[in-house]
Image: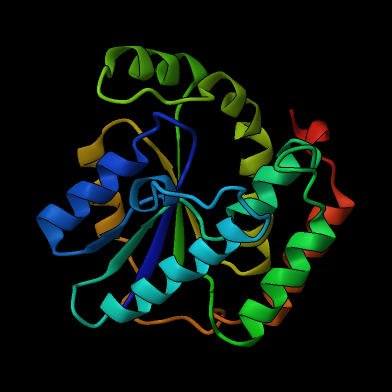
Amino acid sequence: MTIISIEGASAVGKTSTSSELAAIHGAFHIPEINTWWKERPNPEYREWWFERQADRWRIALKNRNKHSFVVIDIDLFQPFWYNWAYDFTLFDNQSLEFIADYYRNLILDQKIGFPDRYYLLSCSEDELIKRKESDSSRKRGGFDMNLQFIKPQKHYFEALNKEVPGLVHFIDSVSVDRNIVEIITSIPSTQNKHTYSIELFDFMVDWLSRNKADQFR
């Protein structure tokens, strides 16, 4: 069965949309790492986050035949474009080469894969701020900092979609209800061939190496 991943800025509606898909349409929702893994090693080693992304993929595979589909809240390959968006200065200066070397083995061993489709949710920065201020249930740490990756992230996913047409579906996130309708009417019915594509992986790494996030801000 199908595995999809929902991405977008903080407060755009990723988690609400994912949760409602699970509640209404029988999907299995895999939340972000911070939700399921609250305890971390001390000191936290550099590969810990990568390992948890592989765990989320394993859980997705385990549940895709038990549910109508699986929805992954936040991209499993987030360490690539998120670090890139901040010029690889975060998380103890993890370089693109360091991340790619670790992920390459995961792809080759089929311990992590690309979803059948990405859904990138977006709305205006003013609307994101309004939603954050009206939602007292979540602290949304680093919200202001994360606004900086919105434009670079969009260009990154546009590049992926150009390389594999249909890999990414872009949604103007007006409301959770409308997000759900658009996802349900466009969700792939079968697994795609790019799941463990080393060619797509190499394209992603090469594109990030050739483009600077600052040029898209």
Look at the picture and state if 8 lies above or below 116.
above
Coordinates of residue 17 in the picture (x, y in percent): 27, 44
Q: Residue furthest left?
A: 24
Q: Is residue 74 left or right of residue 23?
A: right
Let me know if residue 28 appears in the view: yes
In what quadrant of the picture does the N terminus appear? bottom left
Q: Is residue 182 left or right of residue 197?
A: left
Coordinates of residue 114 in the picture (x, y in percent): 53, 71
State the residue in front, 167 or 12.
Answer: 12
In what quadrant of the picture does the C terminus appear? top right
Let me know if residue 166 appears in the view: no
The structure residue drawn at horizontal position 48% and vertical position 22%, both measured from the top left corner, is: 124
Look at the picture and state if 48 lies above or below 68.
above
The structure residue drawn at horizontal position 19% and vertical position 74%, both measured from the top left corner, is: 67
Look at the picture and state if 102 lies above or below 20.
below
Coordinates of residue 128 in the picture (x, y in percent): 43, 21
Q: Residue furthest front?
A: 42
The structure residue drawn at horizontal position 63% and vertical position 79%, both measured from the top left corner, is: 107
The structure residue drawn at horizontal position 28% and vertical position 13%, both measured from the top left corner, is: 134
Q: Is residue 89 left or right of residue 5?
A: right
State the residue in front, 40 or 212.
Answer: 40
